[in-house]
Image (spheres, rainbow, N blue to C red):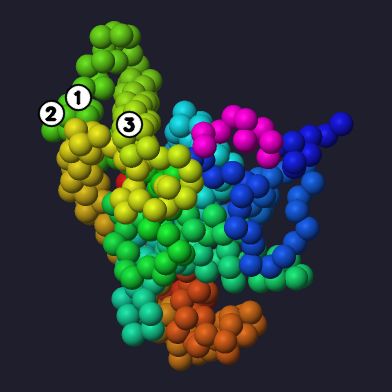
Amino acid sequence: MPRTRQELEALERQNLAPYAQFSADSRGRRHLEPPPQWRTQFQRDRDRVIHSRAFRRLEYKTQVFLNGTGDHLRTRLTHTIEVAGIARNIARALRLNEDLTEAIALAHDLGHSPFGHKGEDALDRLMAKHGGFEHNHQSLRVVEELEQKYPGFPGLNLTWEIREGLMKHCTSYDQPGQRRRLGANSASLEAQVANLADEITYYSHDLDDGLEAGLLSEQQLRRDVRVWAVAARAVQRQHGRLPDECRRYFIIRCIIDDEVRDVVETTEGRIAALQIATADDVRNQTRPLVRYSPACARLNSELRRYLYKNVYFNPVVHEPNARAVKMLEDLFHYLMKHHQAVGELSQKRARKCGWPRAICDYLAGMTDRYVMQEHQRLLGTPQVSGSP
């Protein structure tokens, strides 16, 4: 006999910590639906995210290096999958709801613009007089309105807990504006885990991609980045001389393992010290419970500054992205004057939310290559190229 939703919910009660978010206690969906038969509510949410068009488009959106400039460099999709893996590991160690954590992690960048954070900044400038643009808000907008897959409602009709996690998602990369509250001081522990897993992931893969692109060297990292130096010495002690690719991979693996261990131990300590007993206790906290220790936070701040200087602001990364972002800006101005150039869905949306927001939604949903193709088609200019 297949395992029913009720049996899966009972297993959560048996196996998860009392302060985890139980799927049976979800605050529900905006639009009523029959409950799933062989999945929990959060498992249904995860599957809806994976099957969305916005999720598939992440394959062709820039993470750091302009999409298409290297076969082994991360895209927004591979970044998202890595975040989900690390988030599940932390949630499992803390006895939290892995399905909820994974669903939030998989959905956290659904609203991200093309061309990474440079594209997000450009859309925010273009929309300054119309409410601005932030990919956290846009991810919520995607799952609540923009996906059109179901006959009975707009969006994906995800549970309140997933939408809470998306609204409260914020990392060191983000500079969020005013946030609309969802009725709590803090998000669930599962949302906090997904948030910090995002940070652990991009630290590690930006090191890997920087080395792959030749912007960083191991010698330089040993000298200037303490977290790398410590992990490199440990790998050398344990394994001796290794081939270059294997050595770099294993050093980064050790960095991830150390950070995950630090987060789990630090979070466990805070939960015990504050006597957290329920998911509501978590939401009543004014500061996140899932965090690094002070020592680990200092090391990560050092690493972040180093990556900004040597990777994100490096001309090899910055200049192709800047040229690509100019295409996004050109398209926005063109479409604001030529409304007929957008599709029927965007024209319909404009009647509801106005042309600036409808065009912003249209552009934010584009992949990098589609922006380039549309720029060439509508404005007749060659595509951007740039390789590390």
Q: Residue at x 55, y 38 (%)?
A: 98
Secondary structure mostly seen in the magenta stretch:
helix
What whole-number distance in Å separates the C-alpha atoms at marks 3 and 1?
Answer: 27 Å
Q: Which label was assigned to residue 223?
A: 2
Nearest the eye: 90 or 242 = 90
Residue 95 screen position, x and y as percent: 51, 32
**Would residue 276 be visible to someone looking at this image?**
yes
Image position of 251 with respect to 283: above or below: above
Name the secondary structure under disc 1: helix
Looking at the image, residue 233 sits to the left or right of residue 243; the answer is left
Q: Which label was assigned to residue 229?
A: 1
Segment tinted magenta in the rendering: 9-18
Looking at the image, residue 87 sits to the left or right of residue 131; the answer is right
Residue 14 belongs to magenta span: yes
Image position of 337 with respect to 198: above or below: below
Residue 323 screen position, x and y as percent: 32, 66
Residues at discs 2 and 1 in contact (Cβ within 8 Å) = yes
Name the secondary structure under disc 3: helix
Nearest the eye: 71 or 96 = 96
Label 3 sits on residue: 269
